[in-house]
Structure formats: C-alpha cells, structure tokens
Image (tube, helix red, strand yellow):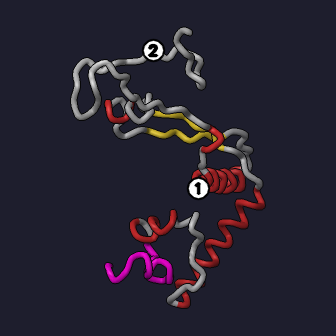
Amino acid sequence: MGIPNCPHCGSPMVPRLYKSSGAWGKAGTPKMINRFIVDKSKAENIEAELQLNHYRLLFEEKFHLTISKMRLQVVIRDGGLQVASGRGITRNSYIIPVTKMDDDKVWRYFLNKESDLLEALSQGSWDTPCSNFECWDGTRCREYCDVWNFCPKGILEKGDKP
C-alpha cells in the first residue's frame, strides 16, 4: 500500500512513533503533530487596510502624489523562538500587501467615525456603539478604548472599573 501523501503539500506522511510509553501515548504508536497551513482566504486585515488607505488619501491630498502600492511590515515579537515556530510562525517579520480601497468608502468611514466621536464628546454620552466587529466582541472596549465611558457598550463591557 505504501506511505500516504499529505493532502495539503503532497509530501509523504512518515509517521513518528513514541519510543516509550507514558500519559501522552503508548510506545510504538504514532505521535500526533500539529501542522499549520496558511489559508490566505481567511486572512482579515480590514482595520489595517482602512488605516493605511486613510494615510494614503491624506498623503496624496497634501503632496499631490499617487501611491500605487502599500505594504504592511509585521514584526514578530517572539519570532524565532520554539513557541512561535510551534504555532506556524516561521520568520521574524512578514511583508503583507495591502489592498487599495475605494477612496469614497475610506473617506465615508473616517468622516462618520469623526462626527460620531465629536458628537459623543459634545453630548457627554453616546447611544450608538461600535459594531461587534469594530470592538472585537467587547475586547477593544474593555482593554483599549479611551472613550469607553461615553458609550453604553463600553460601560457595559468595562463595568465599574476605571
């Protein structure tokens, strides 16, 4: 029958066997090894794309130059360590291409956010919170939002803690 090939990369799947028995497995049985596969279709960088496209528009407006390509350089804090490589991080930094978004969409998004923030600050409160996507299902409200006390969702997520 032969050794089966990996369905993702096509390389032969040679089993690694335990040499001794223990709570993890019995001697002679195959080891279970995590394998990480990059699925670019599941990558989501909308916040970085919006921010960099906003910078692009501001730069183009001020300097009258056209930006054709944008890239995001991501530096891995613990890159090169065994824990990182065990989770599929194989390099210390990555260059990620950023999609050029429609100018009107970017302007609308940031102008809406700006007017919402100014209105919330002038009223002293805000009744239309960020979407679950924007607030990372509440994590952003609890840990990173500087204006959480003006928003009902932020108050709910943060509780009474300052």
The picture places residue 133, in percent across and down from the top left corner, at: 58, 63
Residue 119 among those drawn in magenta: no
Disc 1 element: helix
Pinpoint residue 64: horizontal percent, then vertical percent: 74, 50
Name the one closer to the observer, 114 or 5.
5
Helix, strand or loop under label 2? loop
Write the residue at 37% across / 35% down. 84
Q: Nearer the viewer, residue 80 or 67?
A: 80
The amino acid type found where label 2 is placed reads: Val
Q: CA distance from mark 1 to mark 2?
A: 41 Å
Tell me if label 1 and label 2 are in contact, CB under 8 Å. no
Q: Residue at x 38, y 32 (%)?
A: 86
- What residue is shown with label 2? 14
Residue 47 is labelled as: 1
Which of the two residues, 113 or 61, is positioned nearer the viewer here?
113
Q: Which residues are magenta?
A: 146-162
Residue density around tag 1, few if under 14, some if 14–19, many if 20 or more, within 10 Å: few
Give left or right: position of 26 versus 113.
Answer: left
Q: Is residue 65 left or right of residue 157?
A: right
Whole-percent x, y for residue 66 in the image: 74, 44
- Residue 79, placed above or below residue 142: above
Q: Where residue 124 sits in the image (x, y, percent)? A: 50, 89
Considering only order in the chain, which callout, 2 or 1, is on the residue closer to the N terminus? 2
- Viewer-side residue, 115 vs 94: 94
Quadrant position of the C terminus in the picture: bottom left
The quarter of the displayed image where residue 155 is located: bottom left
Residue type highlighted by circle 1: Glu
Dot 2 crowding, Cα within 10 Å, few <14, some 14–19, many 20+:
few
